[in-house]
Image: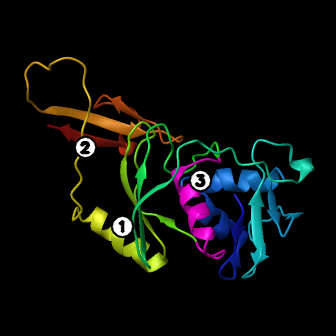
Amino acid sequence: MRHTVEHDAELLAVLRLMYPASSSTKLRKMLTQGRVLVNDDVVHRAKHSVASGDTVDVIVRQRAEERTPPPAPRSTVQLEVLFEDETLLVVNKPHQLLSVATDRLEVDTLHSRCVEYLKESDAQAWCFIVHRLDRDTSGIMVFAKHQQAKRDLQQQFHDREVHRTYRALVEGTPTPAAGTVNSWLMEDKHLNVKAVNKSHPQERRRSPTITR
């Protein structure tokens, strides 16, 4: 993914913007491996200063010495825009598509498609992650076009002001027809969500989940 810097900053801060789900350790490893290019030159320093208008590329799944960004594989699924204004972009996420790149640095994600869509009309455009849906979940996702909109929306999610409804397809007829399931879910570093028991050793990373 190619990113055009909007404001003067350190290179590590720009990488965090490009890959919000990746750890600082992973981003620094990308730098030491020579996989980060600024204006087509390899840069290794996390504190390297970049200016507005500079371009930042990350070499994905290629040898660093080749110094060329990989072609971006595209899915046959098109971006379905449900709503758009000057601050928001609301889209329908298909199943089997990641919301955002993980530490594996996947090229084709819903976030990357939204960025590409916005850049068709404005080369400086960007969108910010507000929330995520699991790879196997389809549904509505909201992206913010500006930092302030991102902060406001994330606060609404944090304060549980956003009502979300999930529907599951089942095979056969459940018995009983209705009920409540209390469980614990945990997300790994690749954003895969799995059920864990209450006494899981990484208990700080697990969240109680109630399904009715």
- Is residue 29 or residue 204 the one in the foreground? 29
Query: Nearer the N terminus, badge 2 or badge 1?
Result: 1
**Label 2 SS:** loop
Q: Is residue 174 left or right of residue 95?
A: left
- For residue 154, which numbered disc appears in the image? 1
Where does the magenta region start and end? 107-125
Q: Are marks 2 and 1 in contact (CB under 8 Å)?
A: no
Res 206 quadrant in image:
top left
Q: Nearer the viewer, mark 3 or mark 2?
A: 2
Q: Give coordinates of residue 196: x percent, y percent.
A: 34, 30
Residue 6 horizontal/vertical position (percent): 65, 79
Q: Residue at x 29, y 63 (%)?
A: 158
- The amino acid type found where label 1 is placed reads Gln
On screen, residue 49 versus residue 7, left or right, reads right
* Mark number, residue 73: none
The quadrant of the picture occupied by the C terminus is: top left
Q: Which residue is identified by label 2? A: 166
What amino acid type should be assigned to the residue bearing mark 2? Tyr
Q: Which mark is residue 23?
A: 3
- Looking at the image, which residue is at 78% across and 51% down? 59
Vertical relation: 151 (above or below) 165:
below
The type of residue carrying mark 3 is Ser
Q: Check disc 1 and report its element: helix, strand or loop.
A: helix
In the rendered view, how is the structure colored? rainbow
